[in-house]
Image (cartoon, grey):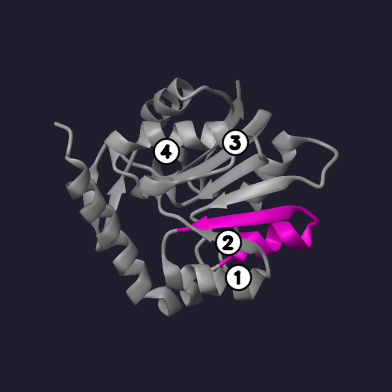
Amino acid sequence: MSLPSMELRALLDATLAHYEGRAAAFWAATRDHDVTQNRSALLTALGPGGPWTILDVGCGPGRDLKAFSELGHRAIGVEGAGRFVAMAQAYSNCEVWQQDFLELDLPQGRFDGIYANASLFHVPRQSLPLVLARLHAALRADGVFFASNPRGTGEEGYRDGRYAVLYDWPSWRSLVAAAGFAAVSHYYRPGDVPVAQARWIASVWRKI
């Protein structure tokens, strides 16, 4: 059953409030996470050349924005939590737009790559097709989309104060393909455990 827009808004606002109230603690806990593999997956799919214009969707305090920028790329963030926007701007010295998933307003065809690391799982399932369509439109022809999400079997609801949807690979593949993307590759993280125990799915896509 579809939720009315007012209820969808409440779900996302509660998640943003969770991050607003814990911004400093979240940054302390995540700033040193090594996601080089994820950034490299996007850049490898983009291929030689560049520098690339990359949109970091749900950029948080700016860890990956800074990393992309230091590699010579033009990195722009989009983030719904106001405290994270300020932190990301200060830390990365990159442009950051304050927009949440239900109100994305992105320029069409501007980005070579879109990077969504641990962010899109907060989008309610019924809203995800629209969000993916807006990301698709924001990419240039043949642009690359990367996403990493916690793994599950379709669970949807609040987890630790944040709204989350946990997909398995077939479900996620179906949703992203329906938005006009072709799968390039996917892998599970961490890579040092059996696949059945890996908690994250990372995937790379190309706009078609």
Q: Which quarter of the rendered picture does the N terminus lie within?
A: top left
Instruction: Give the crowd class for mark 3: few <14, some 14-19, many >=20 residues within 10 Å.
Output: few
Q: Residue at x 30, y 49 (%)?
A: 164
Query: x, y (%) of residue 49?
Result: 85, 39
Q: Quadrant of residue 97?
A: bottom right
**N-terminal label among 2 and 1:** 1
Q: Are marks 2 and 1 in contact (CB under 8 Å)?
A: yes
Indicate which disc residue 89 carries: 1
- Work out which residue is located at the far left of the displayed protein and give it: 1
Amino acid type, callout 2: Val
Residue 134 in sight: yes
The residue pinned by badge 3 equals: 108
For the record, the magenta segment spans 62-79
**N-terminal label among 1 and 4:** 1
Label 1's element? helix
The residue pinned by badge 4 equals: 131
The residue pinned by badge 2 equals: 96
Instruction: Give the crowd class for mark 2: few <14, some 14-19, many >=20 residues within 10 Å.
Output: many
Of labels 1 and 3, the one closer to you: 3
